[in-house]
Image: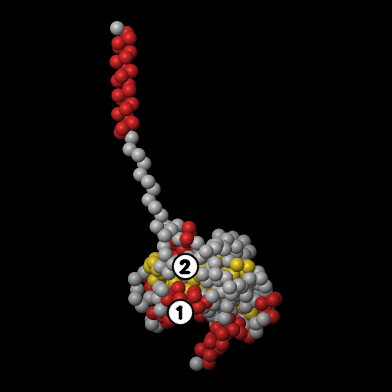
């Protein structure tokens, strides 16, 4: 009898296990990765037909980096999110269109030194072997072709090349070039300050000073050659309460420790440790935005939106110098600013 009961129990357990096995559904196969194709364009943000067009192109990103939501997409999103957290871009976000262009390279990382025969990187991006931290595009013709996949070149108001290299570096000019270094978002703001805002570097460097003319500092929006409060170009800020003790005439700028003055103690054009623009720089960028939008610049309206950004600063996350010789085409920009001042 006991043996019969035992056999019955075993049979019941066997049936239960069998049913349990049948009820376990196999795990579905993971969805295959979807890759962006070379030359593909995605509109990341904006819908203003007359807005500011920002175009981001990648270099040294291989196919494995270009899957949907993958490494390249993540890097671009991080940069764009940060860009719109910085004044005056955050106040003007509604006027921006942001495009991302996909370029597939065969090799990660920038080359060391320019190589005209480089076929492994779509834009031939490289680190200068003569200037520390200077990262440049080697093939601007191809770069502009990718930009034009998004918008006509004349309508590309901001062009950014993101190079897949963890080394610190960048440059500014017609195109702002940055790496995927952890400080890339700060470098981007600095380089766009050059390329879009026409801003001068505010730090001192004897090598750079030897290559430039001190008197040219007066033509940039954020440097001047006088500290006379009745003549300095940002004197309009002095009576405004929100900027008292913040905007002044601080010794040093345009690569010189003396003889040139900057408007605030620290800014992203002085040191990446303070990742914001000073007030006159924010004004210069806003003027540029308004000009593209065909809106007359109103200084009082600017103050109404900008005064919240006026903060006394101390040196922030550490002394982090921007890349050297990074304002590509600075001489041409100075010539243009001189011409505009005469008009």
Instruction: Please state the horizontal and vertical placement of residue 257, each as a whole percent of the image.
Output: 68, 75
| Residue beneath the point at 45% across and 76% down | 145
Q: Earlier in the sequence, mark 2 or mark 1?
A: 2
**Residue situated furthest top in the rendering:** 1
- Taking the image as shown, residue 141 lies to the left or right of residue 17, namely right
- Taking the image as shown, residue 170 lies to the left or right of residue 71, namely right
Foreground of the two, 251 or 21: 21
The residue where tag 2 is placed is 103
Q: Is residue 336 above or below residue 133?
A: below
Foreground of the two, 214 or 38: 38
The image quarter in which residue 36 lies: bottom left
The image quarter in which residue 20 lies: top left
Q: Is residue 67 above or below residue 220?
A: above
- Residue 305 in sight from this viewpoint: no
- Taking the image as shown, residue 29 lies to the left or right of residue 222, namely left
| Residue beneath the point at 65% across and 84% down | 213
Instruction: Please state the horizontal and vertical placement of residue 222, each as a whole percent of the image.
Output: 56, 78
The residue where tag 1 is placed is 288
Q: Secondary structure at mark 1?
A: helix
Instruction: Please state the horizontal and vertical placement of residue 336, each as a whole percent of the image.
Output: 53, 87
User: Quadrant location of the N terminus?
Assistant: top left
- Residue 128 in sight from this viewpoint: yes
| Residue beneath the point at 62% across and 61% down | 318
Foreground of the two, 340 or 305: 340
Q: Which mark is residue 336?
A: none
Mark pair 2, 1: CA separation: 29 Å
Foreground of the two, 186 or 233: 186
| Residue beneath the point at 57% across and 63% down | 109
């Amino acid at each position: 009898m006991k043996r019969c009961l035992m056999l019955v129990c075993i049979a019941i357990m066997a049936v239960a296990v069998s049913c349990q096995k049948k009820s376990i559904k196999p795990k579905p196969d993971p969805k295959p990765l979807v890759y962006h194709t070379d030359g593909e364009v995605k509109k990341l943000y904006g819908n203003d037909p007359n807005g500011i067009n920002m175009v981001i192109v990648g270099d040294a990103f291989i196919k494995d980096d270009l899957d949907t939501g993958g490494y390249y997409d993540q890097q671009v999103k991080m940069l764009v999110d940060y860009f719109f957290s910085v004044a005056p871009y955050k106040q003007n976000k509604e006027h921006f269109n942001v495009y991302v262009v996909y370029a597939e390279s065969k090799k990660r990382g920038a080359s060391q030194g320019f190589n005209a025969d480089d076929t492994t990187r779509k834009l031939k991006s490289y680190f200068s072997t003569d200037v520390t931290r200077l990262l440049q595009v080697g093939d601007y013709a191809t770069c502009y072709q990718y930009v034009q996949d998004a918008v006509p070149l004349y309508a590309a108001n901001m062009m950014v090349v993101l190079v897949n290299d963890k080394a610190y570096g960048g440059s500014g000019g017609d195109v702002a070039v940055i790496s995927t270094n952890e400080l890339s978002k700060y470098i981007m703001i600095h380089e766009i300050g050059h390329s879009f805002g026409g801003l001068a570097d505010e730090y001192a460097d004897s090598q750079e000073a030897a290559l430039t003319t001190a008197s040219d500092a007066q033509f940039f929006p954020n440097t001047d050659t006088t500290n006379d409060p009745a003549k300095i170009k940002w004197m309009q800020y002095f009576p405004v309460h929100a900027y008292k003790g913040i905007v002044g005439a601080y010794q040093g700028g345009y690569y010189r420790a003396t003889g040139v003055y900057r408007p605030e103690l620290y800014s992203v054009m002085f040191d990446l440790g303070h990742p914001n623009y000073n007030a006159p720089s924010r004004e210069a960028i806003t003027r540029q935005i308004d000009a593209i939008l065909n809106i007359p610049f109103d200084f009082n309206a600017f103050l109404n939106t900008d005064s919240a950004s006026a903060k006394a600063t101390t040196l922030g996350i550490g002394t982090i110098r921007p890349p050297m010789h990074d304002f590509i085409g600075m001489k041409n920009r100075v010539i243009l600013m001189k011409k505009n001042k005469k008009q």
